Amino acid sequence: MFLATAVETLPTSPLAGTADLVTVTFPWGSLLRGVLGSDENALCGVASVARTGGRVETLASVMPWDGVPGIERLEASCRDPIETAWAAAGLELTSMREATSAELDAARSSWARRLGADRRVWRLEGARSG
């Protein structure tokens, strides 16, 4: 199946509750704001795709010019508000840490290869609660 739609409309899609794993790699715009808890509709869209017990994994990076409300740079101190937003969307944030170089290589992203040392990438992991 191929589906092209905005993440905000996913809760009513045929994909709802079907995925064992939802992977979001280097999001931007509303998807970035969503996985970081600043856009409730986008986060609920991501969460809706995972089945109960399904995992959500994200590689994300934030700099001041990315325009994420309340987050100038992604760092450990951002965990509490992200965890609260994920819980409201039915997700349990189980891990939030800096991504390893092996994880960045495994992403096979040209964007990952262009990141400079001043732009840290974080790995967020969670699961859809029942």
Image: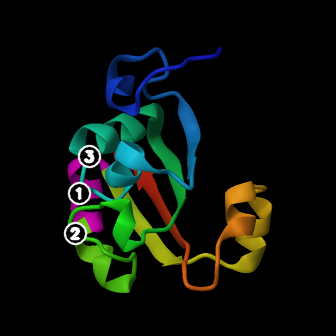
- Of residue 7 and residue 116, the one placed in the foreground of this image is 116
CB under 8 Å between discs 3 and 1: yes
Quarter in which the N terminus is drawn: top right
Q: Name the amino acid type tagged 3.
A: Ala
Q: Which residue is mark 1?
A: 85
Q: Earlier in the sequence, mark 3 or mark 2?
A: 2
- 115 vs 42, left or right, is right
Q: Residue 108 in the image: state x and y as whole percent.
A: 78, 56
**What residue lies at 55% left-to-right and 85% top-to-bottom?**
118
Label 3 belongs to which residue? 89
For image coordinates 58% across by 40% down, the residue present is 20
The magenta segment is 82-90
What is the three-letter code of the residue carrying label 2? Pro
Q: How are the colours assigned in the image?
A: rainbow
Query: What's the residue at 29%, 66% (across, down)?
Result: 83
Q: Residue furthest front?
A: 65
Label 1 residue SS: helix
Type of the residue with mark 1: Ala
Quarter of the figure with the C terminus: top left
Q: Position of residue 98 (x, y in %)?
A: 55, 80
**Classed neighbour count for the residue bearing mark 2: other residues with Cα under 10 Å, few (<14), some (14–19), many (≥20):** some
Do the residues bearing badges 3 and 2 touch, measured as CB atoms within 8 Å?
no
